[in-house]
Amino acid sequence: MIDDLYSARILSLAANLPHAGRLSAPQGTGEKVAKLCGSKAIVDVILDDQGHVAEFAQEVKACALGQAGAGVVGEAAIGATEAEIEAARDAMLTMLKSGGEGPEGRFEGLRILKQVADYPARRASSMVAIEALLEAVRAALKHHTDTRTNIAGAA
């Protein structure tokens, strides 16, 4: 039964991680660890002037499910807004815990992890990348706000 969880698509996503690595000067960084299994994602972002993700990099050390989630996040992150990422994270949690359909729009690919709902011990691992992305974007938005405040205060 667990073999069904590790489909060819999940294994392919896990093996081909987009935007692997770190940014040299990120505006925001997020880090999430699944305490039960130790899966970990570190995400760096740079935002454009409208608050969309302009640059993205991720360092992920996770099981195939965490890597697959990171694969989808890596394919979808560029151009995303905080609201889109938060909605995807919330829809993912609902999908895994309450039988929801899963994310829509640019993060719809995370629905590939719907079967993880049947394996509670694996849920946190599949969430590390989207949660780290949301944390990174929020840190970058705070950086933007702090920078604007400092510029306004200096004028």
Image: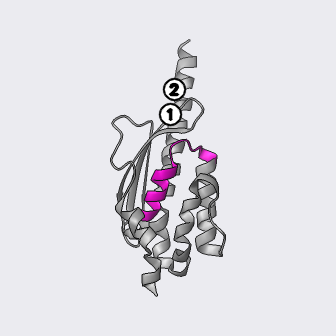
The magenta segment is 67-83
Q: Give the labeled residue for mark 1.
A: 143
Res 51 quadrant in image: top right
- The local secondary structure at tag 1 comes to helix
Which of 129 and 4 lies nearest the eye of the viewer? Answer: 4
Could you give the CA–CA distance between mark 1 and mark 2, rounded to whole angstroms? Answer: 6 Å
Which of 82 and 101 lies nearest the eye of the viewer? Answer: 101
Side of 136 where 58 appears, left or right: left
Residue 9 placement (x, y as % from top left): 45, 68
Side of 35 where 88 appears, left or right: right
Among all residues in the image, which is located at the extreme top?
A: 155
Colour convention: one colour
The residue drawn where x is 62% and y is 61% is 103
The residue drawn where x is 45% and y is 52% is 74
| Whether residue 25 can be seen here | yes
- The local secondary structure at tag 2 comes to helix
The residue drawn where x is 39% and y is 65% is 12
Residue 147 is marked as 2
Residue 42 placement (x, y as % from top left): 39, 52
Badge 1 vs badge 2, beta-carbon distance below 8 Å: yes
| Whether residue 67 can be seen here | no
